[in-house]
Image (cartoon, rainbow, N blue to C red):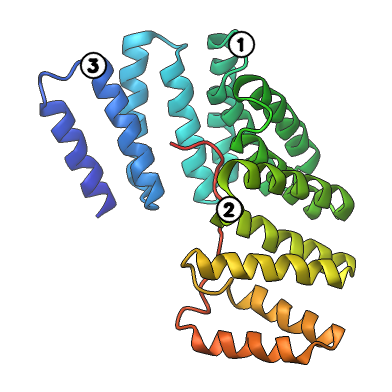
Amino acid sequence: IAANHSIASLRFINAWKPVSETERSKSLQVLANGFMLFGRYDSTLLLMDTAIALNRRIYGDVSEALCANYLCLARAYNNLTRYQEALPYINKSIEIGRQVFQKPHPLLAKSIYVRGVIQANLKEFQAAVRDFEEAERMVRQALGETHPAVGNVYQMMGDTYNDMGDLETALNYSRRSLAIREATLGVHHGEVGYVCLYLGNLYLQTGDYPNAILYYERGYEIAIKDGNGTPGFDKASRMLFLYATVGDFVKEAAVFESMLRQGDWLTGFGERSEYVSN
C-alpha cells in the first residue's frame, strides 16, 4: 500500500506541468517526510531516490537539498533498525552540509545529531557523545541557548550516558533537558511529562526513591491531563513498586485502581522523537 501511495504521488508531481523542477524537488522531500511520520519507510526510500537524482541534475553533487535528502534516507534506515545501511547516508549528508553551510546551521546540526542516534543504536557510545556535543554547540549557536532542540540533544545525551552506566551524568543532562522543555513548551506539555518519567526511572536506578516518586507522579499527572491515558504498564508498575517500597500503600492501591479503570493502560506514553520538525 505504501509503495502504491508513493508511486501515485510521483505520478501526480510529474504530471503537474506548471511545477518547476525545484518545486518538484521540495514536494518530494515533504512527501517523503510525511510518509516517514506514518511509518511508510519504503515510500520514503523510493521518493528520496527520485529526489536525489533530480537534485543532482539541478544543483550538482553539493547542495542543501541533497544534504536534506541523504538525512531523510538515513533516518528511514535508522527507523527500520538498519543502522549499518544508515551510516553511509548520514555521513554523506554531513559531508555535503559542511561544504554548503559556512556558519552553524540547523540542518547540519540535525544531521550530526542523527548520526549520534545511529551510533548510539550501534552501541558506539563514545562516537555518539562526540556527535551530540557537536550538535549541541551548533544548535546553541544557530537557534539560541534555550531552543527546544537543545533540550532534545541533552535528553539524547542523557539516554546515552544511561546506556553507558553513568547515571549521574545522565541525570545532569536529563535535568537540563527538563528545564529547557519547561521554559519553552510549558510545564504541562507531553514532552515535559516524558522527561519526568525518564528522570523517575533514573532516580529509581540510583535508589533515590523519594525523587523517583516525585518525578513519576508528575509525569503520570501530565499523561492524564495530556489525554494520553496512563504512562504505560511498565512505568505504572514501577510506581507500584516505589509506593510499596516506601510503605505508602494508599497511593499504591490508588495507582492500581487507576490502571484498572483505564481502557488504554497498556499503551506507552511519551515516545522519544527527533528534535527538529520535518
Q: Nearer the viewer, residue 189 or 28?
A: 189
Q: CA distance from mark 2 to mark 1?
A: 30 Å
The Cα atoms of the two marked residues, 1 and 3, are separated by 27 Å
Numbered circle sitting on residue 191? 2
- The numbered disc on residue 21 is 3
Q: Residue at x 61, y 59 (%)?
A: 193
Q: Which of marks 3 and 2 precedes in the sequence?
A: 3
Give whichever of 199, 42 is nearer the camera: 199
Say if mark 1 contacts mark 3, CB within 8 Å: no
Q: On the image, numbered disc 1 is attached to which residue?
A: 103
- Which amino acid type is marked by label 3? Glu
Q: Secondary structure at mark 3?
A: helix
Q: Mark 2 near mark 1, Cβ–Cβ under 8 Å? A: no
Q: Secondary structure at mark 2?
A: helix
Quarter of the image with the C terminus is: top left
Q: Earlier in the sequence, mark 1 or mark 3?
A: 3
Image location (x, y in percent) of residue 122: 69, 46
Instruction: Compare residues 150 and 111 and report the one nearer the observer.
Output: 150
Q: Position of residue 66 (x, y in %)?
A: 44, 20
Question: Residue 231 at x, y = what percent?
Answer: 59, 71
Quick check: 178 left or right of 66? right
Q: Is residue 122 visible?
A: no
Residue occupying image coordinates x 85% and y 72%: 209
Compared with residue 84, is residue 197 higher up or lower down, i.e. above or below?
Answer: below
Q: Is residue 161 left or right of residue 258?
A: right
- The residue that appears at 72% across and 41% down in the rendered structure is 154
Q: Amino acid at mark 2?
A: Glu
**Residue in the picture at 55% in, 17% down:** 97
